[in-house]
């Protein structure tokens, strides 16, 4: 049979593993929220035959102690009980924001997928399960048969699955030739045949890579899947050459969702010490300017927590955002956020406060550094009388503290990275060459990418972005693709300031999406 082709569906490899800790519920929730049609995952089982999700035989690569430390010795998931497995942390290895992510039960993942109409492609590692674990797995699959896609590289195993689970999809990922396809062809519309795309991620495979002739042969008998693709150049090449029905991606390739949306993810209200803007007033501006929504991200400047009721201000901010969001439901989104400044000064206070509220987004900022006796916000420092040596020392320490923040504070977005220059150069005209700090900045960008954090393009200045345009370009060249727009508005009318120009700049720089956040999950919209 010859199957018709349309734009490929997308499958999230181990969930949205490019942005979230692999094979965790937060990675699976992200896949659902971002619009993927399939989730690929890796079942495993514990000593007491609880079915969980884990790629490796050992837990060591992704598990950490309660204190966030690597494990001292190799631990096989098959050698520990489910309760023992639950004692470890499976998210903090990626970033502080994922601390306390637990190993998921396979049932949890299947239930989430079924509730949202998403298919789950189960990796063929289940063929190595013990007889007792297989029995438990098959019993669970029977409950979720219409949600499951079973994978094997063995034609006999595909026939076994076809008979045992008549409602399940069947996905073949073994060697492909005319004889194999003839054996698989009776599986009909249930069948997808997968071919690897050449890349560093598939360098280990022993089956033939996708090419035009092999893909054409597959599509005579089955739907075609291409795995695993991590960038748009490869994606566009695979689509143009092979016209696949499904493409598996780490999460860097996004479903086509949210066209025309625009969100301002950095907005202050009168609950910040330096703003007088009511949330309701900003909401009216949002409607008038045609934005899709904004996040109320009032200041949590931790250096003041002894002398100010910061917790009370943040609680008031969240409650006001929630009340106005309810009034504006169906018109715009108003999101609950917070901007944490100087979080590294009192880490425990920050983490306790974050547990008190259900934020949609958390911004990480540095507004002050502990340089000599100048611990106040840099907006209040007279850089006009500071020596060049002290300016150099100040900025060096600033970038050091940004790096420390990335490693310790559970934020989603890194804001206005070059903000001190707004005062040093723009206000005091000191003419500091920011490229002197390129090694520190490049290290920060690498850490942002490695921790799957999001870089804010802050549009609050009239003449430049924060960070500078060359830094945004460097971030993109290094492989970074997660960006948000933030006006840093302290006055309602500044909401969405210069967004049209910023979006053009981002598109010219090579970005395809910006992000907004709901319930700490980043959601892309097309530029």
Image (tube, rainbow, N blue to C red):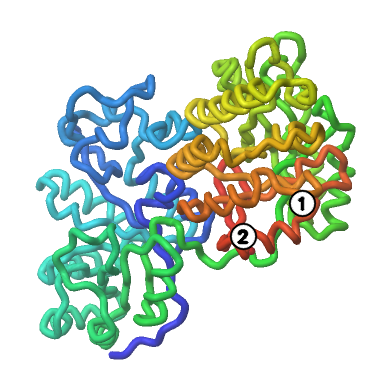
Element assignment for label 1? loop
Residue matched to label 1: 329
Instruction: Indicate left or right for 137 with 480 as reference.
Output: left
The nearer-to-camera label among 2 and 1 is 2
Q: Which of marks 2 and 1 is nearer the N terminus?
A: 1
Q: Nearer the viewer, residue 185 or 469?
A: 469
Query: Are discs 2 and 1 less than 8 Å apart at CB?
Result: no
**Is residue 381 among what the camera can see?**
yes
Place of residue 488 in the rendered image (x, y in percent of width and height, measured from the top left): 76, 41
What is the number of the mark on residue 525?
2
Q: Distance between the residues labelled 2 and 1?
A: 19 Å
Q: Which of 67 and 483 is in front in this view?
A: 483
Q: Specify whether 46 is left or right of 472.
A: left
Q: Where residue 422 appears, x then y in whole percent?
A: 75, 37
Q: Quadrant of the C terminus?
A: bottom right
Q: Is mark 2 on a helix, strand or loop?
A: strand
Q: Residue at x 73, y 22 (%)?
A: 377
Which residue occupies 45% across, 58% down? 252
């Amino acid at each position: 049979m010859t199957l018709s082709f349309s734009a490929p569906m997308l499958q999230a490899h181990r969930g949205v593993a490019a942005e979230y800790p692999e094979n965790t519920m937060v990675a699976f929730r992200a896949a659902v929220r971002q619009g993927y049609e399939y989730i690929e995952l890796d079942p495993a089982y514990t000593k007491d035959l609880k079915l969980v999700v884990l790629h490796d035989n050992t837990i060591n690569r992704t598990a950490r102690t309660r204190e966030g430390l690597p494990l001292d010795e190799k631990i096989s998931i098959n050698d520990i009980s489910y309760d023992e497995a639950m004692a470890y942390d499976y998210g903090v290895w990626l970033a502080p924001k994922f601390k306390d992510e637990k190993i998921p039960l396979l049932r949890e993942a299947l239930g989430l997928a079924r509730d949202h109409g998403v298919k789950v492609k189960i990796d063929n590692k289940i063929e190595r399960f013990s007889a007792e674990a297989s029995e438990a797995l098959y019993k669970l699959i029977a409950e979720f048969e219409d949600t499951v896609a079973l994978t094997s590289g063995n034609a006999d195993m595909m026939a076994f699955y076809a008979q045992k689970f008549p409602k399940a999809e069947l996905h073949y990922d073994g060697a492909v030739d005319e004889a194999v396809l003839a054996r698989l062809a009776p599986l009909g519309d249930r069948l997808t045949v997968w071919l690897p795309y050449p890349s560093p991620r598939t360098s280990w495979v022993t089956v033939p890579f996708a090419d035009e002739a092999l893909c054409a042969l597959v599509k005579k008998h089955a739907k075609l899947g291409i795995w695993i693709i991590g960038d748009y150049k490869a994606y566009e090449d695979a689509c143009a050459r092979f016209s696949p029905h499904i493409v598996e991606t780490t999460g860097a390739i996004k479903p086509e969702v949210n066209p025309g949306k625009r969100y301002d993810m950095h907005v202050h209200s009168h609950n910040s010490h330096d703003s007088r803007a009511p949330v309701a007033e900003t909401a009216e501006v949002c409607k008038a300017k045609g934005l899709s929504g904004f996040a109320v991200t009032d200041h949590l400047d931790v250096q003041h927590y002894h002398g100010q009721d910061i917790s009370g201000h943040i609680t008031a901010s969240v409650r006001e955002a929630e009340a106005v969001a309810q009034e504006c439901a169906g018109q715009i989104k108003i999101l609950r956020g917070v901007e944490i400044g100087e979080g590294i000064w009192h880490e425990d206070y920050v983490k306790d406060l974050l547990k008190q509220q259900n934020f949609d987004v958390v911004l990480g900022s540095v507004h002050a550094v502990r340089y000599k006796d100048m611990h106040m916000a840099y907006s209040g420092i007279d850089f006009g009388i500071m020596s060049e040596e002290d300016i150099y020392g100040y900025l060096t320490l600033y970038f050091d503290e940004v790096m420390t923040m990335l490693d310790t504070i559970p934020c989603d977005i890194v804001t206005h990275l070059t903000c001190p220059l707004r005062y040093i150069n723009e206000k005091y005209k000191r003419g500091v060459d920011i490229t002197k700090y390129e090694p520190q900045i490049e290290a920060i960008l690498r850490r942002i990418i490695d921790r799957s954090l999001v870089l804010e393009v802050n549009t609050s200045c009239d003449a430049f972005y924060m960070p500078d345009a060359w830094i945004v370009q460097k971030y993109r060249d290094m492989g970074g693709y997660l960006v948000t727009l933030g006006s840093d508005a302290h006055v309602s009318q500044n909401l969405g300031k210069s967004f049209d120009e910023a979006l053009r700049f981002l598109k010219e720089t090579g970005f395809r999406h910006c992000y907004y956040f709901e319930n700490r999950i980043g959601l892309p919209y097309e530029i």
